[in-house]
Image (cartoon, helix red, strand yellow):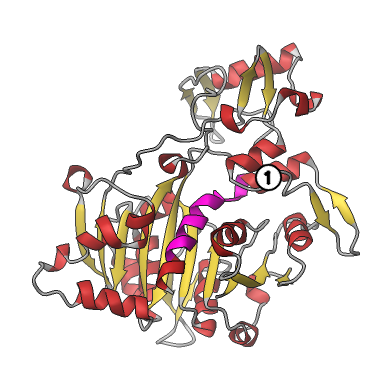
Amino acid sequence: MKVLELFAGVGGFRIGLEKSDNQLFETKWANQWEPSRKSQDAFEVYDYHFPDSENINISISDITDEEFSKMDADMIVGGFPCQDYSVARSKKNEKGIEGKKGVLFWEIIRATENIKPKYLILENVDRLLKAPSKQRGRDFAIMLTAFNNLGYSVEWRVINAADYGRSQRRRRVFFFVYRNDTNFAKSIDEQYENNEAVAEEYKYDEYLFQTGLFATQFPIKNRPVKNRHVFHELGDDIVEVSDNFTGTVWNTGIMRYGKYYSIDTEPNFNGRPITLGEILQDEKDVPDKYFITDQAKLEKFQFLRGPKRIERTSADGHTYIYSEGGMAPYDDLNLPGRTMLTSEGTVNRSTHFLKVNGKYRLITPVEAERLQDFPDNWTAKKKSTDGSIIDVSDKMRMFFMGNALVTEIVRKIGDFIKKID
C-alpha cells in the first residue's frame, strides 16, 4: 500500500505504520517544511533515516495539482495544525469557496482531490472538536463537509495514549477517512447504512461501540457518558455549515453521506500504562548536564510549579490578578508522563522535572523519544543539504518530540487497516 506522509516531521506516522507491517505500508512520498525557519532540521532527520522515498522540502502549497495527481498513493497520513477553517463564497466564482489563506487543511483536501486515495489517517489536537469558542464544533463540521463533498466517510476518536497503556498522557483526535466506493465502505453500507430496523440516530451505535476501527483497536465502555449521543445532518453547502453550524461534536463519531453520529465515550482498557519511571535511562547513561544542582534554578522550578496570585497590568492600564494552581514539586515516576510540549527541557512549568535517587534532573532527548514511542536516538543525527551527517542539538530534539505523536497509536490503526485492505 503506497503512502504519502504530509507534515512529516521526523517520521512518526511512518514509524508507526512500519511497526505494524513494513511489507504492506510503503511510504513513497513525504513532505516536510518548517515555514519560519532557515534550517530545515526535521526534514534533514527524516531524510537521514529514509533516503529511499521522494522527500519534498517545500511548502505544501507549492506542490502543484499536477504533481499531486502523479502520486498514486493509496493512503495519505499526517498531523496538521489547528487553524481557522471558516470559508466564504469566492468573489471570483459564485460556486467556488474560499478558505483563509495558509490554512493547511485545505491543502490536504487539494491533495485528496488530486490523488483520490482509498484512505487517510489524520491527527490533530483534541480542542479542534470544540473550535472556535464562539461557534463550537464549526471547524470540525466544515472538515467533515469537505470530505463528504469529495465522496469520503470520516470516523474519529479522541485518544489519550496513557488510557491505552502508553507512557504519556497525550490527548489527540485521530481520524480515519475512507472513500465511499472502497470494499470497506461498501461492507459498512450493507451492515449499517441500509439497516432500516434501527432508528436513524442509533444506526451506527454498534459500529462506534464494537466493530469500527477505533472500537476494535481502542476499546470503550459500551454506553455513552451522561447519555451524550447526537445525530446531525450537515448537508453539502460548506459555506452554510461555516456560517450557521450549531451542532455538538463528542469525542467519538462517524460521518457518512453528510450525516454524523457522535457519542461521548470512556476508555475501557484492562492493562496499566507504562510509567514515567519505566522509560528513564540508567543514571550512569544520563549526562551531567541534565542534573540540576544550581540552587537558583531549583528555586525557579519550585516557584513555577507552585500556586500563584500575581497582580498584573494589561496594555490598557487595567490591573488584574493572575492566579495559577499549584502542581506537584516534581513529576510522579509511578504515573505516565505529562503531555510533552515543544518547550520541553527549558525552565518552565510544563517541562518534566524529576527527582530520581535524591537528585533533581530534566528528561533526556532519549527519554523524550521513548515518551512518543520512537526508537532511542532517532533524532540524534541529520543529513544536511551537502550530504554530511551532523549532530542535532538537544533543544531541537526536544522540539521535534513536542511536535510528534505517539507512534504506537498509529501502529494499532495500521493493524486494523491491514485487516480490511
Q: Is residue 219 left or right of residue 347?
A: left
Q: Is residue 409 magenta?
A: yes
Give the magenta-colored segment's residue range: 402-416
x and y percentages locating residue 207 in the rendered image: 26, 62
* Three-letter residue code for mark 1: Phe
Q: How many marks?
A: 1
Q: Which residue is mark 1?
A: 399
- For residue 418, say whether it is visible: yes
x and y percentages locating residue 75 in the rendered image: 52, 73
Res. 152 image quadrant: bottom left
* Residue displayed at 66% across by 18% down: 300
Secondary element at image label 1: helix
Q: Residues within 10 Å of mark 1 (few under 14, many from 20)?
A: many
Up the image or down, 152 lies above or below 287; here it is below
Q: Quadrant of the N terminus?
A: bottom right
Up the image or down, 215 lies above or below 375; here it is below
- For residue 135, say whether it is visible: no
Residue 140 vs residue 278, the one in the foreground:
278
Q: Is residue 225 left or right of residue 70?
A: left
* Residue displayed at 86% across by 64% down: 385
Q: Is residue 244 left or right of residue 167?
A: left
Up the image or down, 313 lies above or below 54; here it is above
Q: Quadrant of the C terminus?
A: bottom left
Q: Main secondary structure of the magenta part?
A: helix
* Residue displayed at 73% across by 11% down: 295
